[in-house]
Image (tube, rainbow, N blue to C red):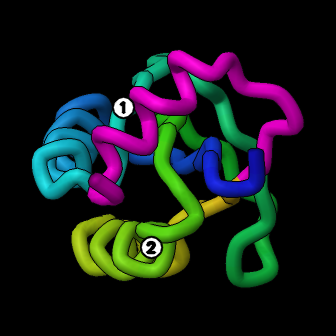
Amino acid sequence: MSDVLVILCTFPDSGQARQIGTVLVEKQLAACVNLIPAVESIYRWQGNVETANEVLAIFKTTSAVFPAFEKTLTELHPYEVPEIIALTPTQVSDPYREWILGNSGLR
């Protein structure tokens, strides 16, 4: 199942998450994005501990389009260092896997 990726990325608000997520789906760099509002993040930035309310985006895509996905997301994202964490699922149902492959620029 190494061809399917689940990517986590946080955004400062739902408007930006929705706008960028839509672009990535329209360009077929992701088959789907789920937006989870009201995530509280605690992190270290430039030597200080910070907190922020963010929106978590969960993208479903493929390893084949990941380089273009990452480039586009990095260009559009408002953060200097956006969170882009790609996870490889060990199990994906065949119909859902085929749907991801068919909607992420591979076919």
Density class for disc 1 (Cα within 10 Å; few <14, some 14-19, many ≥20) is many
The spot of residue 99 in percent (x, y) is 40, 28
Q: Nearer the viewer, residue 31 or 38?
A: 31
Q: Is residue 18 left or right of residue 79?
A: left
Answer yes or no: is residue 94 visible. Answer: yes
The spot of residue 71 in percent (x, y) is 37, 81
Count of all numbered marks drawn on residues in the image: 2
Q: Is residue 38 left or right of residue 4?
A: left
The amino acid beneath tag 2 is: Glu
Q: Is residue 92 magenta?
A: yes
At a point 60% along the width and 25% down the height, the residue shown is 39
Q: Quick one: label 2 or label 1, which is nearer the N terminus?
A: 1
The relative height of residue 54 versus residue 74 in the rendered view (above or below) is above
Density class for disc 2 (Cα within 10 Å; few <14, some 14-19, many ≥20) is some
Location of mark 2 (residue): 70
The amino acid beneath tag 1 is: Cys
At a point 22% along the width and 44% down the height, the residue shown is 25
Secondary structure type for disc 2: helix
Secondary structure type for disc 1: strand
- Point out the stretch of residues depicted in magenta: 87-107
At a point 75% along the width and 55% down the height, the residue shown is 2
Which of the image's four quarters has the N terminus? Answer: top right
Q: Is residue 18 left or right of residue 34?
A: left
Location of mark 1 (residue): 32
Q: Is residue 70 left or right of residue 31?
A: right
At a point 43% along the width and 23% down the height, the residue shown is 34
Q: Nearer the viewer, residue 7 or 1?
A: 1
**Quadrant location of residue 92?**
top right
User: Label 2 to label 1, Cα distance in Å?
Assistant: 15 Å
The spot of residue 40 in percent (x, y) is 65, 29
